[in-house]
Amino acid sequence: MDTAIIVSVIIGSVVAMVLVFAKTVLGVAWTGKSTRSVRTTETRIQDKLRQEYPLGISNSKSELRLIQKLNQSSVDVQKTATLNSLINKQVSTCDHATIGNIHSVSNGMMVVTHNESSSQQKRYEIPIYFVRQNYEYQVLLDICARDLEHYVPQMAY
């Protein structure tokens, strides 16, 4: 008796999952609602470009590439300005240990240097995505001080 109940519950669950799949995935594919929104977006972009550049290119693929280039260049300028603002700021870990100052930023990595004594200098290469908060003179990282040994570069400078 218990086996029959378990088997019927499993079969009912499978049927329910198949019906949900059919309604969501196949319903969109058969009605074509997703393709309509893409076409509407493309026509809006084309109309906007024609208004801004009346003597411009008539090929829609070229227009889309132009829009992508314009958007990408403005994002790149903003990212570069933000990254350059990190240089020379004091760096603290999530447990409030000061580890040094940002020396340089490139390729998604920031180089943090700390002078312990006149002869020894600690250097860390930390990915930028660990920046939790960027204050005026200080940067707070999502790294604990005990995990910093993973970010010491293997090559000597």
Image: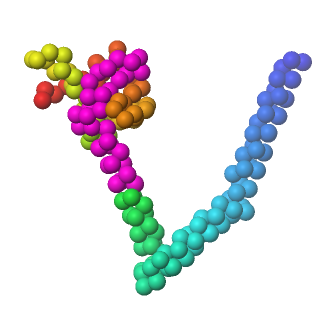
Q: Position of residue 113 (x, y in %)?
A: 22, 26
Q: Is residue 31 above or below residue 122?
A: below
Q: Position of residue 77 (x, y in %)?
A: 34, 54
Q: Position of residue 14 (x, y in %)?
A: 76, 36
Q: Residue furthest right?
A: 1
Magenta span: 75-104
Q: Is residue 67 magenta?
A: no
Q: Residue furthest left?
A: 119
User: Nearest the camera: 90 or 122?
Assistant: 90
User: Nearest the camera: 148 or 117?
Assistant: 117
Colour approach in the figure: rainbow
Q: Is residue 50 above or below residue 136?
A: below
Q: Is 34 displayed left or right of 8 in the figure?
A: left
Q: Is residue 40 above or below residue 113?
A: below
- Residue found 13% across the figure and 26% down from its top: 156
- Residue found 26% across the figure and 34% down from its top: 88
Q: Is 38 displayed left or right of 154 in the figure?
A: right
- Residue found 65% across the figure and 60% down from its top: 34
Q: Is 66 displayed left or right of 42 in the figure?
A: left
> Where the N terminus falls, by quadrant?
top right
- Examine the image and state in which quarter residue 123 appears: top left
Q: Is 69 displayed left or right of 90 in the figure?
A: right
Any part of residue 144 in sight: no
Any part of residue 138 in sight: yes
Q: Position of residue 22 (x, y in %)?
A: 74, 49
Q: Residue furthest front?
A: 136
> Where the C terminus falls, by quadrant?
top left
Q: Is residue 82 magenta?
A: yes
- Residue found 42% across the figure and 61% down from its top: 71
User: Nearest the camera: 122 or 138?
Assistant: 138
